[in-house]
Image: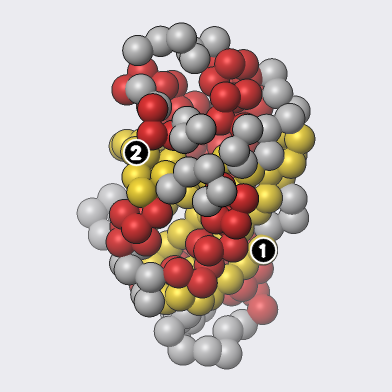
Amino acid sequence: MDNLSRITSFQLEVLKEIGNIGAGHSATALSTLLGRKIDMKVPSVQVVSFDEMMEMAGGPDNIVVSVFLRIEGDAPGSMFFVLSLEQASRYIQQMTGEEDFSFSSPPYSEIGLSAMQELGNILSGSYLSSLSDFTNLSLFPSVPGLSIDMVGAIISYGLIELSQSSDMAIVINTTLTDDDNKNDNSLNGHFFLLPDPDSFAIMFSALGVDKHE
């Protein structure tokens, strides 16, 4: 049964609201970490095909920075946070002060890699915590893994379970803004949420929205 292809606009609004609450928690954590005000919003949530998901990240051959975590517990699945090399490099430069850091020029400093992993950990963990609060489901993130590779190679790992019953995924678009430099320091990333085949119905049943149009 392909549950994702039948997701309603109301259900997407629920996911967006959960995303914005998680974004608020992420912004607070990042503001504390960086020592300056950070804003984060979820402008849209979409259901897209696997091919469309690849294209949103620049195409299957495009090299990106991704933080992956496995969702464990009552509704298992996979989650990726994906940024372009340029956006990820800019974040590391801002956070660590390494002005010449670039994911386009390996080898990378250990502090840069740790900072990137921490960004993905904070953002993914906050969204998952918000989702868990709303559903009262027990959802636990695995230890996050950092990858710098082609989109196709990274995402294929998360499609092993889902592709048995669906060819769709949930995309949570995010905008991260440094409040001191709003005009030129916005980071635009994507969360790819890939629930396992049985998890979609469990999540929306727990939210009480499975009967809505």
Quarter placement of the C terminus: top left
Q: Residue at x 61, y 41 (%)?
A: 196
Please, what is the three-letter code of the amino acid marked with disc 1?
A: Gly
Q: In this view of the protein, can residue 1 be seen by the observer?
A: yes
- Residue labelled with disc 2: 46
Residue 165 in percent (x, y) is at 53, 43
Q: Residue at horizontal 35%, vertical 22%?
A: 8
- Tell me the kind of residue under disc 2: Gln
Between marks 1 and 2, how big is the CA–CA gap? 24 Å
Mark 2 neighbour class, 10 Å CA radius: few under 14, some 14 to 19, many 20 or more: some
Residue at image position (57%, 90%) is: 107
Mark 1 lies on residue = 145
Q: Tell me where residue 98 appears, x and y as whole percent.
A: 51, 78
When the figure is inspected, residue 183 is found, relative to residue 117, above or below; the finding is above
The mark closer to the camera, 1 or 2, is 2
Image coords of residue 102 (percent x, y): 45, 81
Q: Secondary structure at mark 1?
A: strand
Horizontal and vertical percent position of residue 84 = 38, 67
